Amino acid sequence: MDPAGRLEGEIIRDAMLSVSGTLDTTMFGPGTLDESMRRRSVYFTVKRSRLIPMMMVLDWPEALNSMASRPTTTIAPQALLFLNSAEARQYAEAFSQRLTAGSVSESIDRGYQIAFGRSPTPSESKLAESFIETQAHRYEQDKKANPRSVAMTDFCQSLMSANEFIYVE
């Protein structure tokens, strides 16, 4: 972790897998170049001709040279990764499936507990409920299947995109 508090790319990816409930905790064994693997990021094989795009955007160390310290950037492609990547959406879908039991407010509270280790403030809870209701209503109008489920996936994706998820105070 850098002094400013941002987590390294491997930890961010591992955290996304963890909150989604899809992290494979199997230890040891060979590495892989398969971007869709669910094991910890330490099991990625580093091959200079086939670098993992998600990890490169999140400041994976340079594969050609040794480095005294890892750079930490804040760039638009990182935000776009959280918003538009297929992997982030898959993690958000799996995360939302962990929250389906109970009311919307219970799901919001559980989502905050899993992602941030705390309960939402009353303001955050109200905003989250409003967001989920608005999204579900829009998806109903667009005749999407399972509008509430898709709205909950949007909510989970927003939790994993939040600064609180990728920075340590």
Image (cartoon, rainbow, N blue to C red):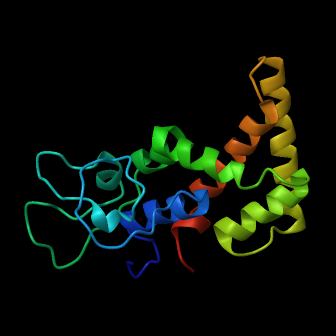
Q: Residue 166: x percent and y percent?
A: 52, 66
Please indicate whether residue 29 sits to the left or right of residue 89 in the image: left
Q: Name the quadrant of the N terminus.
A: bottom left
Quadrant hosting residue 21: bottom right
The residue under the point 17% across, 45% down is: 50
- Give the residue displayed 46% in from the left and 62% down from the top: 24
40 lies left or right of 130: left
- Image coordinates for residue 163, horizontal then vertical, percent: 57, 63
Depth order, front residue of 85/5: 85
Q: Quadrant of residue 66?
A: bottom left
Location of residue 80 with respect to 109 vertically, above or below: above
Residue 152, horizontal then vertical, whole percent: 75, 44
Q: Is residue 22 above or below residue 61?
A: above
Q: Is residue 43 left or right of residue 125?
A: left
- Quadrant placement of the C terminus: bottom right
Nearest the viewer among 22 and 76 is 22
Please name the residue shown 84% across and 69% down the image: 121
